[in-house]
Image: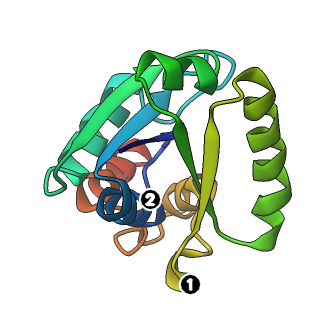
Amino acid sequence: MKVLYPGSFDPLTNGHLDLIMRASDLFGEVVVAVLENPAKIAAFSLERRLQQIRIATKHIKDIKIISFTGLTVKCAKDEQVNVILRGLRALSDFEYELQIAHTNRTLDGDLETIFLATQAHHSFLSSSVVKEVARFGGETSHMVPEIISKDLQKLFE
């Protein structure tokens, strides 16, 4: 069974990586779908984010890393996936994620959304927090894979 894990991953955090590894154990194949959102200014280019994720996940079998634009439901259909994975860090994430899950379900009635709670020690992590820490010279090696920590240092030098 395949699962789609969509997101901007700007950057991929250790929380994201944990969910990818756990999804691999649960579902077999994980399709990590990196959103290219022209309305947002990303810290890292789409191609760099794809490279970062490939490097950070090279030890995980049965993973596919793709990019997409537009609706997640279209991406799922294109990849022939019926299950979307979403991570929850805190209760505050649930309301937003549930709204998205319901919206996706109205667009494609065969599409299921599965929520996985992050491990407690990753519950504070978000891409925004990581970038803010890096912007002010803070240590990020415990928040993101090594390749991304190095890229963040270069980005904010």
Which amino acid lies under the numbered mark 2 shown in the image of this protein? Thr
Q: Position of residue 85 (x, y in %)?
A: 54, 49
**Which image quadrant: the N terminus?**
top left
**Nearer to us in this view, 132 or 16:** 16
Say which quarter of the image contains residue 99: top right
Which amino acid lies under the numbered mark 1 shown in the image of this protein? Ala
39 with respect to 83 (left or right): right
- How many numbered tags mark residues here? 2
The residue that mark 2 highlights is: 13
- In the displayed structure, 71 sits above or below 6; it is above
Say which quarter of the image contains residue 107: top right
- In the displayed structure, 28 sits above or below 42; it is below
**Is the residue marked by circle 1 packed among few (<14), some (14-19), or many (20+) residues within 10 Å?**
few
Q: Position of residue 67 (x, y in %)?
A: 41, 23
**Is the residue marked by circle 2 packed among few (<14), some (14-19), or many (20+) residues within 10 Å?**
many
The residue that mark 1 highlights is: 120
- In the displayed structure, 70 sits above or below 31; it is above
Q: Which type of secondary structure does the marked residue at label 2 adopt?
A: loop
Find the residue positioned furthest to the bottom: 120
Q: Which type of secondary structure does the marked residue at label 1 adopt?
A: helix
